[in-house]
Image (cartoon, rainbow, N blue to C red):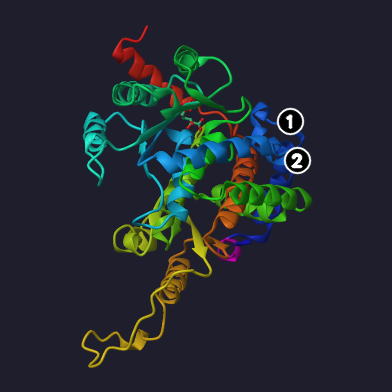
Amino acid sequence: MIKINTSRAKQFLAEDEFRQAYQQAEDAYETVKRGSGEGSEWLGWRDLLADPNDAILEQIDSLAANIREQADVFIVCGIGGSYLGSRAVIEALQPFFDNDGPEIIFAGHHMSGKYLKDLIDYLDKPNEEGEQKSIFLNVISKSGTTLETALSFRVLRKWITEKFPEDVDDRIICTTSKEGGALNELINKHGFKKFIIPDDVGGRFSVLTPVGLFPIAVAGIDIRTLFYEAVSKYEELEEDPGQVLDYAATKFALFNNGKSLDVLTTFEPQLEALGGWLQQLLGESEGKQGKGMFPATAIYSTDLHSIGQFIQQGTRNMMETFITIESAEENITIEELSGNHDGLNYLSGQTFHEINKQAFKGTLQAHTDGSVPSIVISLDELNAQHIGEFIYFYELLTAVYCYCLGVNPFDQPGVEDYKREMYQLLGKH
Ligand code: PA5
């Protein structure tokens, strides 16, 4: 279960401010439900939970199991919504070191030639048995034309074709739209395997389609639990959207109150990439028409020793969203040390998780005292079940909150501006 506590944000709001924002959140939710708002042709992320297609999960699972058996390295080549969701789930649920199964490497989300060159040098290096590593490549691009992804794919495709001429068609898996785009032309020409991204699901809302689910399954994570817990959350929120309305209204009222920055933070470093997913989901959805709160991310305690100072005492334009985990599966208990020379015996008998929780509580109190309104989201445990719930919760929250702001949650016209300038400089015809 995930719980949302908005009390430390609401204490900074007048009752009236919240009540008005709540009414707008109710209207915004109805707009999502009726599909009557701007961008309503992009509501497919709800439909795929309302009417689950188990056959696709089966297809993904079976190909992923096959690849897990054969691959040393699995490369995910994509940018923005085409990789942030899978990276978030994989990093949240895999051990920090020494994973079972293939090593997952992300590429195609920038244009560092050094990165690509270093990656190819690494792929060229023999495995522990002195043989060529077995490589599989999943290129993900809904448009099939995004330059960062397409260029990296061109280079990686050439390398993989030369290394594995006999079965290159099995080693390249493309995830793209049903039709159109340069990627579909390559698929038709070379016969690469293909997963389809539904037309009515935008990139940043696509983690529960093959875009996210396939790499997540290759990482050995149970995609059925992830997916069907999102389905349960969908059903729960259809019955009673109160949790989303409370959060959306609180955030919207804080925005109306002059807050322009939301620091998304956690004391769990394995959630760093989840922060990246949230940052894109919120940032690309709400940041339009001179509106929205800039979604910053921070990892504590690490960042308490850098930007923590600013959050405590800098410009008072921010709110904070804490993502916490109630109970940890693996933990280390502090042992009593004879002589107590490091002075830490006062902590003996406590686990790192318990101590980390006190760091969270202390920070929450300090930041409240420093006039930072905070929302706390707690997951009982860090597992596929709660991450599945979390994903749908945040997708719905984003849509509702954006309609409160009066912006289309599903487009990204600003992104097109940099692309246009870049293509002009590069001489694209
Ligand atoms: O959320 C979005 O729509 C974007 O972030 C896209 O996912 C990103 O631009 C990548 O686009 P594409 O999958 O078409 O390569």
| 378 or 83: nearer the viewer | 83
Q: Position of residue 173 (x, y in %)?
A: 46, 28
List x then y, in percent, for residue 182.
Answer: 45, 15
> Image quadrant of residue 315?
bottom left
Rounded to the nearest angstrom, the CA distance separating label 1 from label 2 is: 8 Å
Task: Look at the image and tell me whether residue 357 can be seen.
Answer: yes
Q: SS at mark 1?
A: loop
Name the outermost residue toward the top.
Answer: 429
Residue 8 is covered by the magenta coloring: yes
Q: Looking at numbered disc 1 in the image, what kind of residue is underneath it?
A: Ser
- Residue 221 within the magenta-colored segment of the rendering: no
Give the percent coordinates (x, y) of residue 253: 60, 51
Q: Which mark is residue 14?
A: none
For the N terminus, the image quarter is bottom right
Picture quarter containing residue 148?
top left
Tell me where the magenta segment starts and ends, as one range: 6-12
Q: Nearer the viewer, residue 224 or 111?
A: 224
Q: Quadrant of the C terminus?
A: top left
Total count of labels: 2
Q: Amino acid at mark 2?
A: Glu
Dot label at residue 36? 1
Residue at screen point 70% across, 45% down: 24
Helix, strand or loop status at disc 2: helix
Question: Vertical placement of 37 versus 257: above or below?
Answer: above
Q: Considering only order in the chain, which callout, 2 or 1, is on the residue closer to the N terminus?
A: 2
Q: Which residue was labeled with disc 2?
A: 30
Residue appearing at x 57%, y 28% in the figure:
197
Please state the horizontal and vertical placement of residue 193, each as a whole percent of the image: 50, 25
Q: Quadrant of residue 46?
A: top right
Q: Is residue 389 above or below residue 301?
A: above
Q: Is residue 360 left or right of residue 230?
A: left
Does residue 152 appear to the left or right of 363 in the view shown?
left
